[in-house]
Every structure is written in structure tokens, then in C-alpha cells.
């Protein structure tokens, strides 16, 4: 018997706890698995009753997601000849021909551009500010930090009213630059708070040694502090990216065409007679998968990220 | 630290830039580092905030740019605070807040407690459970409308199967009595992991020696739970509640995609109501006052939060 055996849960306890947690995990995963599965169903399988668990997988949803199609007359079909590609063949089952790409690709790309753009600026500005807050005497530091945090807590719709008016004046409505600017400002709160915490954990002695060795303050910052804060900054970047990626309220109000991101677009995917659920599911799957992968990468810093650095493991 | 590391970094600096920066004092660098952030916050946060406050005293409407803008004093505020529809919205929000927080705390804490039993593979399952909360709420809300479909939806099918009722006999988002619970269920599904993670951190922060001492004193497990576990997790739990409180107070994307505030205005939370006033009825001045009221509320909550946060940090 080891010395801490009295506090170690018994085998039976572990077994019961484990099965309960696994049961919850399976139940909680069902909706997500259902989304992924629906993406591979045919429209009739997707709305079958009772819901189909076993089905013939098809890429119809993905084809519908990325293309626009038109119904073709028999003459047109003859004229078009035999379908040349696998996606042509899928569409041809319904006497349709592919008219062109859909807007999903563009919207997805917008999400990528705006997400990465705003993350980059939020990290650069946030790292600099966090370093200053951590190492220098900045007047009203605590008030500033609190104010920065409180900006994140504002209801997005309340923020949107003046931003909408301001962007209209400046011609920033529905532009990539406008959205990047806005998300940068919102993400700054997270990046400053998180990176501030990470930099605080780096002993100040390293910099002092570097300064004694003749380094300037700036050199000490990027040669001593930055390399040590890399992991923290990287995980902060992923959190910023996920926020910008997931954001809906401001994107729905401030973008409509050129700069529209995927979240406001996916619910508008309409098929013939209501929502084209396999296409919506396909769009959601492609959109949600990167976040799930990032979640796995982030799992060590997850707690810190979601609590603005209040809780550290 | 190896010298090569420094050499490599030194080479990367353009000499002109390095020379320029070398002369800067700490104070100058502090300013250079903080100034862009301050500038951006002024432009995107402070300036719009002041603009909102100014608009809140007028009858300005965006869709009538040529109409004369009148100063109406506190009229907008008076109308909002005496508007019975807005109080109804507040009640809806309160119902949503109370139930989501209650359920998330109960389920989240239980899960954390079970995971803390350190069964094999608990890390893996924790990561899996966390997935829902990282996803885009709007996309999730949209997809849940599919799961909630009366005839074909998975949710209705499972509930129908378990309770031996016809799955098409009830509509979670179409029924006035069920819709408020439909949004509570999805929010709980999505955010329980959040409470769970924070509770887990709390549970793991309790040193095992305390339990050993209690064991030596022959304290029962039940008593250990109430006198050690719960009090020590409480600050973490409070933090989680405040976080969820603020987040759900401003809830918009998930619910707007799920029910759109309907049926009627049964699930019209404050943010959805505000969106209708500001961007559908275009009552800009009125909704600015509304926004200011929400700002003040959230600011109050936020300051409580920071106090609680500091308490947790002290431990």
C-alpha cells in the first residue's frame, strides 16, 4: 500500500466514475456526430423517419455546398453529353447541371482572412502592451487592464450600434479591413490579459542579466522574453483565432457580401423546398472541424484561455 | 542560455533599427508598446461609447438621415424602464440565466467530481467533452433546429423513444411552453464543459494532505465533502457562475439562430430585443439608451467578477 492510499479512490469508484463520464461524453457527442453524418447523407436520407443511422454515404451534400445547380431540360442534358466528373454524375441524378461555384468558398476564405488578420494584429499589439504592463510602471495600470477586460464583456449588439454608424461614415461596412480592425480591438482584451499572465511568469532576473550584459531594453524583450513566452503566445493566438472564426453577431450586422464570413452564411444555405440539410451539415462540418483540432492542441492551456488567465492549472 | 541563441537573434535585427531603438529609455519603450493599443481602444471602444451616450439623448433614426435630430433628454431612458415589453424580455433573460446556470453548475460540478477520481483515460474524455463549447454558437444553433424538427429530428426521436410518445407530437422550438426550455437545453449542452473545467481546476487545487488529515480524524466522506471539497471549490464555482452569467446576459448568436426569439417573442432575450429595436425598427436613439443601460449592468457584473477573480488568485 502506498502512503497516499487513503485519498486514492478505490478501483470500484474509478470504474463507476469512468463509466458515468464516458456515458455523458457519448451523449454529448451525439449531436456533433449527427452533424457530420448528415453531411454524408442524401437529402431524402437526411429527413427520413425514423432517423437513419445506417445509410448509403454520398458526397451530394458537399457537391451542393460548393456548387450552384440549374435544372436542365432533356435537350440540354443531351447536349451536355455524358457527365465527365464524379460531381457531375451526382448532380445529373436529379436532371441538373452545375452552373458554377457557390459562395461558400468565398465565405470560408473571408473567415480565414479576417480570422488570421485580426489574430496577427491582436497578438502583435497585445504582446507589446502586455510586456509594458508587466515590466514597466504604466500610470493607471490596473484601471486600464480592467477597462480592457470590460470591453470584452459588452453585449455585441450594443457595441454594434455605434460601430455600424462609424463604419458607414468611414466606408468600412462590409470590408475585410473593417472586420479585421473590429476583431483586433475585441481580441486585444484576451491577448493582453493572457500574454500578461504568461510574461509575468518569466523571472525578471533573465532580463536584468541581459541588461547587465549590455543589451538594450528592446533587445532584452525580443531576445530573452519573447522566446520564453512563445508557447503562451501561440496558444493565445489560437484562442483569438477561434473567437474571430466563431463570431456571428457583428459579422451578421456589419457584413452582407464581399466580407461576409461563414457563420452568417451557413444558415442561409437553402435547397429546393426548405433548408438543404446535407449541404448545411457539410458546411458546418468543414467549418467546425478545424476548431476541434485546435481544441486538442490547446488542451493544456484551455482553462487559462477561457477564463482570461484567472485560473491556471 | 547558449550564446548561439543570442547571436542568431542579434543577426536578425536590422542595424539601423537597432541603433535607433538602443537610445530609447524604458519610459519611451513603454509608451511605444502601449500607445497602439490605447489608440485602437480609443477608436473602437471609447469613441463609439461616447457616441452611443450622446445618441441616447436624441430621437435619431438611421433610416431617416434627413429628419431633424431632436434632443429629448432622458425620455428614452424613461420609456425603456417603463416599457412592459422590455420587462418581459428581462424576465425571459432571467429565466434563461437562472436555469442555464443552475443546470450547468450541477452537471458541470458532478462531471468534474467524477473526472477527479482519476480513472484511466480521464484526460482524453475531458477533451472530448469540451468540444461543444469551442464551436461557433450560430452554426450550432442553426444545426439544433434540425435536431429539434418534430418528425425527423434526432432529439425528438430520442425523447419520443424514451418516453413512448410520438416524436411529432411536440415541437421544441414551435411550442410556446417548450421554446424557453429548448434554448436552455442547447446552452447547457454547449457550456456545461466550461463549468466542468473550472471546477476540475478547483478540485485539483485541493492538497491531498487535507483529506489525509480528515481521514485520521475519522471524518466521514460525506462530512469531508461538505467541509473540505465544497468550500475549497466554491471560489472557482463562483467564478464560473459569473462568467456564465455575463456571457448569457449578452447571449445572441445561439438563440437567434435557434428560435429567432420566437415563437412570438417567447425566447426574445435582451440582445435579440435590442437588435430588433436598433436594426429592424431603426430606433437608433432609443436603442442607444437601451445599450447604455446594458453597458452599465454588464459593467457592474464585470467589477464584481474582477473582485471574485482576485479572491481566487489570492489562494
Image: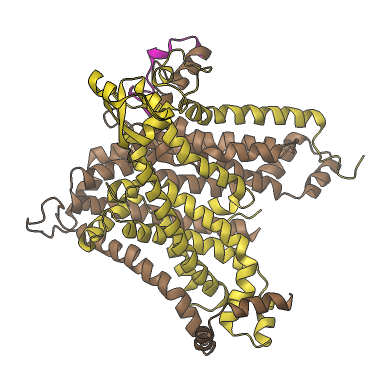
Chain colours: A yellow, B brown
Dominant SS of magenta comes to: loop
Q: Nearer the viewer, residue B35 or B59?
A: B35
Q: Position of residue A135 (x, y in %)?
A: 57, 76
Above or below for B99 versus A213: above
Tell me, yes or no, if residue B235 can be seen here: no
State the quadrant of the N terminus of chain A: top right
Q: Position of residue A174 (x, y in %)?
A: 27, 53
Residue B79 appears left or right of B67? right
Q: Residue furthest bottom?
A: B23
Residue B221 appears left or right of B161? right
Residue A37 appears left or right of A263? right
Above or below for B157 versus B228: above
Q: Position of residue A181 (x, y in %)?
A: 36, 61
Q: Nearer the viewer, residue B152 or B161?
A: B152
Q: Residue at x 30, y 53 (%)?
A: A160
Q: Nearer the viewer, residue B46 or A165?
A: A165
Q: Residue at x 47, y 62 (%)?
A: A120
Q: Position of residue A130 (x, y in %)?
A: 52, 69
How many labels, in total?
A: 0
Q: Is residue B166 magenta?
A: yes
Place residue B276 in its image quadrant.
top left
Magenta region: B163-179
Place residue B127 in its image quadrant.
top right
Place residue A165 in its image quadrant.
bottom left
Q: Residue at x 43, y 46 (%)?
A: A246
Q: Residue at x 65, y 44 (%)?
A: B200
Q: Residue furthest right?
A: A1
Q: Nearer the viewer, residue A270 or A232?
A: A270
Above or below for B15 versus A234: below
Tell me, yes or no, if residue A25 can be seen here: yes
Amino acid at each position: 500500500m502506498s502512503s497516499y492510499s487513503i485519498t486514492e479512490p478505490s478501483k470500484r469508484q474509478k470504474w463507476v466514475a469512468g463509466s458515468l463520464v464516458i456515458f455523458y461524453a457519448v451523449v454529448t457527442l451525439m449531436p456533433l456526430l449527427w452533424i457530420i453524418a448528415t453531411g454524408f447523407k442524401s437529402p431524402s436520407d437526411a429527413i427520413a423517419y425514423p432517423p437513419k443511422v445506417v445509410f448509403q454515404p454520398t458526397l451530394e451534400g458537399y457537391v451542393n455546398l460548393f456548387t450552384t445547380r440549374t435544372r436542365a431540360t432533356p435537350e440540354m442534358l443531351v447536349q451536355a453529353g455524358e457527365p465527365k466528373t464524379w460531381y457531375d454524375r451526382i448532380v445529373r441524378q436529379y436532371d441538373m447541371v452545375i452552373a458554377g461555384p457557390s459562395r461558400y468558398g468565398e465565405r470560408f476564405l473571408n473567415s480565414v482572412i479576417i480570422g488570421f488578420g485580426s489574430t496577427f494584429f491582436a497578438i502583435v499589439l497585445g504582446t507589446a502592451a502586455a510586456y509594458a504592463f508587466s515590466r514597466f510602471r504604466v500610470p493607471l495600470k490596473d484601471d486600464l487592464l480592467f477597462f480592457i477586460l470590460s470591453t470584452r464583456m459588452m453585449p455585441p449588439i450594443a457595441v454594434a450600434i455605434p460601430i455600424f454608424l462609424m463604419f458607414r461614415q468611414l466606408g468600412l461596412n462590409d470590408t475585410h479591413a473593417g472586420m479585421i480592425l473590429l476583431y483586433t480591438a475585441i481580441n486585444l482584451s484576451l491577448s493582453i490579459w493572457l500574454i500578461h499572465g504568461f510574461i509575468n511568469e518569466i523571472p525578471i532576473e533573465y532580463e536584468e542579466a541581459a541588461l547587465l550584459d549590455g543589451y538594450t531594453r528592446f533587445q532584452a524583450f525580443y531576445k530573452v522574453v519573447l522566446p520564453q513566452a512563445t508557447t503562451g503566445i501561440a496558444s493565445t493566438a489560437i484562442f483569438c483565432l477561434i473567437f474571430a472564426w466563431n463570431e456571428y453577431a457583428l459579422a451578421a450586422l456589419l457584413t452582407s457580401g464581399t466580407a461576409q464570413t461563414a457563420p452568417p452564411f451557413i444558415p442561409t444555405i437553402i435547397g429546393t423546398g426548405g433548408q438543404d440539410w446535407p449541404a448545411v451539415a457539410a458546411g458546418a462540418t468543414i467549418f467546425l472541424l478545424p476548431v476541434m483540432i485546435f481544441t486538442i492542441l490547446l488542451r493544456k492551456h484551455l482553462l487559462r484561455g477561457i477564463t482570461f488567465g484567472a485560473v491556471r492549472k | 542560455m547558449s550564446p548561439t541563441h543570442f547571436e542568431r537573434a542579434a543577426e536578425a535585427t536590422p542595424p539601423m533599427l537597432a541603433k535607433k531603438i538602443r537610445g530609447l529609455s524604458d519610459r519611451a519603450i513603454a509608451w511605444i508598446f502601449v500607445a497602439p493599443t490605447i489608440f485602437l481602444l480609443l477608436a473602437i471602444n471609447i469613441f463609439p461609447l461616447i457616441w452611443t451616450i450622446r445618441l441616447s439623448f436624441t430621437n435619431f433614426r438611421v433610416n431617416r438621415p434627413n429628419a431633424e435630430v431632436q434632443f429629448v433628454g432622458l425620455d428614452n431612458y424613461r420609456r425603456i424602464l417603463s416599457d412592459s415589453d422590455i420587462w418581459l424580455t428581462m424576465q425571459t433573460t432571467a429565466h434563461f440565466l437562472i436555469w442555464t446556470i443552475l443546470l450547468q453548475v450541477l452537471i458541470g460540478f458532478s462531471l468534474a467530481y467524477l473526472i477527479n477520481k482519476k480513472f484511466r483515460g480521464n484526460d482524453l474524455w475531458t477533451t472530448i467533452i469540451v468540444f461543444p463549447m469551442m464551436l461557433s454558437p450560430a452554426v450550432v444553433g442553426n444545426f439544433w433546429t434540425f435536431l429539434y424538427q418534430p418528425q425527423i429530428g434526432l432529439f425528438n426521436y430520442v425523447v419520443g423513444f424514451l418516453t413512448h410518445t410520438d416524436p411529432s407530437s411536440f415541437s421544441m422550438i414551435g411550442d410556446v411552453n417548450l421554446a424557453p426550455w429548448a434554448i436552455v437545453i442547447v446552452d447547457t449542452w454547449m457550456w456545461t464543459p466550461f463549468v466542468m473545467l473550472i471546477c476540475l481546476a478547483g478540485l485539483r487545487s485541493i492538497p491531498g494532505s487535507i483529506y489525509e488529515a480528515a481521514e485520521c480524524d475519522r471524518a466521514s466522506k460525506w462530512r469531508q465533502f461538505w467541509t473540505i471539497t465544497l468550500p475549497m471549490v466554491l471560489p472557482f464555482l463562483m467564478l464560473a457562475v459569473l462568467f456564465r452569467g455575463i456571457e448569457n446576459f449578452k447571449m445572441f448568436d445561439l438563440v437567434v439562430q435557434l428560435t429567432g426569439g420566437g415563437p412570438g417573442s417567447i425566447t426574445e432575450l435582451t440582445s435579440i430585443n435590442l437588435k430588433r429595436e436598433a436594426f429592424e425598427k431603426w430606433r437608433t436613439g432609443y436603442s442607444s439608451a437601451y445599450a447604455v443601460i446594458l453597458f452599465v449592468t454588464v459593467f457592474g457584473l464585470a467589477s464584481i467578477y474582477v473582485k471574485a477573480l482576485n479572491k481566487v488568485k489570492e489562494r
